[in-house]
Image: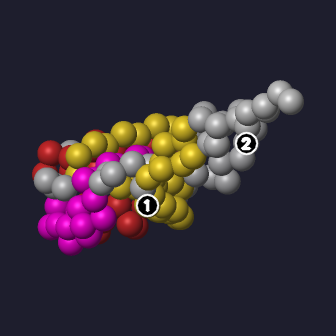
């Protein structure tokens, strides 16, 4: 009788340490495009001011299906761990930036996640 081998099981495993934060911003219509650019430039500088913030990336919506629901900007921040996010949240530079940008946001979505690798 011939032996049939089963395919290897696919596994998922959490990547050690790092935590990522994804933010979606919907700016208020009354916020001038030049002011949006200035706010984003200031936001990008937090990576130089907050030690626990390791990387900062951003992009503008490019969805051809019009599924963005008005969100125009996406940001991805990387922290060493969950404690890094906690330190970021109370850091004076973040708090100051939050005060400046909040009046210009109509809506925001924030998701924190631990990256997961998928192996076959």
> What residue is rendered at 45% in x and 58% in y?
113
Is-magenta flag for residue 116?
A: no
Q: In this view, does 11 lie above or below 92?
A: above
* Element type at mark 2: loop
Using the rendered image of the protein, determine whether residue 100 is visible from the camera's viewpoint. Answer: no
| The residue positioned farthest toward the right in the image shown | 1
Q: Give the range drawn in magenta.
A: 73-94
Quadrant for the C terminus, please. Answer: top right
Tell me, what colour scheme is on the image?
secondary structure
Image coordinates for residue 28, horizontal then vertical, percent: 51, 58
* Residue that badge 2 annotates: 66
Q: Nearer the viewer, residue 68 or 37?
A: 68
Q: Is residue 79 left or right of residue 31?
A: left
Q: Which mark is residue 112?
A: 1
Disc 2 packing (10 Å; few <14; some 14–19; many ≥20): few
Q: Do the residues labelled 2 and 1 touch (CB within 8 Å)?
A: no
Which circle, 2 or 1, is nearer the viewer? 1
Mark 2 or mark 1: which comes first in sequence? 2
* Element type at mark 1: strand
Q: In this view, does 107 lie to the left or right of 93?
A: right
Image coordinates for residue 30, horizontal then vertical, percent: 50, 56
Q: In this view, does 48 lie to the left or right of 6?
A: left
Which of the 4 image quarters holds residue 81?
bottom left
Q: In this view, does 50 lie above or below 67?
A: below
Using the rendered image of the protein, determine whether residue 17 is visible from the camera's viewpoint. Answer: yes
> What residue is rendered at 54% in x and 38% in y?
119
Q: In this view, does 5 lie above or below 22?
A: above
Quadrant for the N terminus, please. Answer: top right
Image coordinates for residue 87, horizontal then vertical, percent: 20, 67
């Amino acid at each position: 009788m011939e032996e049939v081998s089963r395919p290897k099981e696919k596994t998922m495993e959490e990547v050690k340490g790092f935590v990522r934060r994804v933010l979606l911003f919907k700016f208020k219509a009354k916020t001038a495009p030049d002011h949006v650019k200035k706010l984003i430039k200031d936001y990008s500088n937090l990576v130089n001011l907050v030690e626990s913030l390791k990387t900062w990336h951003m992009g503008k919506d490019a969805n051809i299906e019009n599924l963005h629901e008005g969100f125009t900007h996406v940001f991805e921040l990387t922290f060493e761990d969950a404690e890094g996010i906690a330190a970021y949240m109370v850091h004076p530079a973040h708090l100051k930036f939050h005060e400046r940008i909040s009046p210009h946001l109509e809506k925001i979505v924030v998701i924190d996640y631990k990256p997961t690798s998928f192996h076959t």
